[in-house]
Image (cartoon, rainbow, N blue to C red):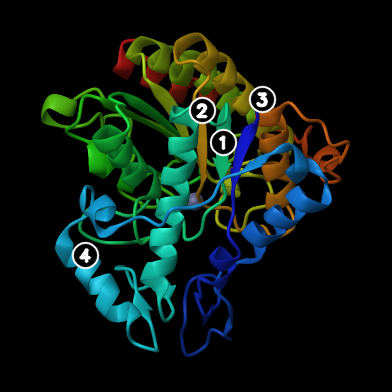
Amino acid sequence: MTTGWVWHERFGWHDTGTAAGFLKGEFIQPLQHVESPESKARFASLVEVSGIAKALKRIEITKASDEDILRVHTSEHLDKMKALSADIRGGDMGDGVSPFGFAGVDLACLAAGGTISALRAVVEGEVANAYALVRPPGHHARPEKGMGFCMFANVAVAIAHARARLGIERVAVVDWDVHHGNGTEACFEADPNILTISLHQDGNFPPDTGKVADRGVGPGKGSAINIPLPAGSGEGAYLDAFDRVVLPAIARFKPDVIMVASGFDSSNADPLGRMLLVSGSYRRMTRRLMDLAASLCGGRLVISHEGGYSPFYVPFCGLAVVETLSGVATGVEDPYERFWKDLPGQELQPHQRALVDAVVQACGL
Ligand SMILES: [Zn+2]
């Protein structure tokens, strides 16, 4: 069986306008907003140019319906996004730094639909696993509002769809984006059947969420796991967290399917993160999750794209993941990896081990 691939040209049309980084101001010279089409469109281009696209099964997207969105989000949020999208000037998703253009809500529903379609293709056995390269991203969107460049919580919307329509009950989500997957966590914080695990840079964004002690609420207590790694963490810290927290926690949870919220802003090249990962790091994390999925849930692994703001490096990180998922080696080498894979700090450091120790203890692993 092959690997499913989701991409749509219109994901490049989501218009975040001008800003510098993510801000505008009297003395901030306008530039392209950091959440621009570049990193994602160039990832899609490399998938084509490398030749691996021919080995993938392209999955047609069914746009998320209002019913799909409303399983996770409030009608007030959806109605507001629709009203702003009808304005030729567009609007903001909810926090003042997440702009979108005319018809932005249609693109956000297409992105959520891309993740749903990938999950459906895997659950129905059409493909072995899948990568959904969607835009805008989703993991910061809360039920009642968008934030952090995310309008709708793509992964959460897909999970809710799968539970309502595809007979799926238990899902584990691993979020390796450098920022906390606060939105996905918020959607399921009281739900014991959805395990959310976020590895992120401590205090980056949102600054006040994703702490070790945040474990979910009420009946969902224990179903959220946060691994707030110190700034400067490299592959050693991530793999230690995988081997001692992520993998055993998922094995204990016994999901029907594993999903990944895949942000490549935890790479060494990202302007919005301070971590050291290289493309090979994502390759090794993907491999571990594939092996676990094979032993737990028939290999069902669905990866949905989130952040990643280096236009020159995201494509190589993405290709590494798609090569691993599909078992196809393109022969295209990451030209940057040799400069960064042996950086001082790439190996596990004592203060990083101490943080993982704290998570192990908090989770009773
Ligand atoms: Zn991010």
Using residue 41 as the reference point, say whether residue 183 is left or right of it: left
Work out whether residue 237 or residue 297 is closer to the camera in this orientation and state it. 297
For image coordinates 36% across by 19% down, the residue present is 255
Residue type highlighted by circle 3: Arg
> Which is more N-terminal, label 2 or label 1?
1
> Which is more N-terminal, label 2 or label 4?
4
For ligand 1, tell me if the residue under mark 1 lies within 8 Å.
no
Circle 4 sits on which residue?
Answer: 77
* Tag of residue 301: 2
- Residue 183 is situated, as x and y percent measured from the top left of the image, at 31, 48
Q: Secondary structure at mark 3?
A: helix
Circle 3 sits on which residue?
Answer: 284
* Tag of residue 130: 1
For image coordinates 23% across by 53% down, the residue present is 67
Q: Secondary structure at mark 1?
A: strand
Residues at circles 3 and 1 in contact by the CB criterion of under 8 Å: no
- Residue 266 is situated, as x and y percent measured from the top left of the image, at 58, 44
Please rate how many residues cluster around mark 4, counting C-alpha atoms within 10 Å: few if below 14, some from 14 to 19, many from 20.
many
Instruction: Give the CA separation, mark 1 to mark 4.
Output: 29 Å
Instruction: Give the CA separation, mark 3 to mark 1.
Output: 17 Å
Q: Mark 3 or mark 2: which is in front?
A: 2
Q: Residue 28, located in which quarter of the rendered image?
A: bottom right
For image coordinates 66% across by 65% down, the residue present is 38
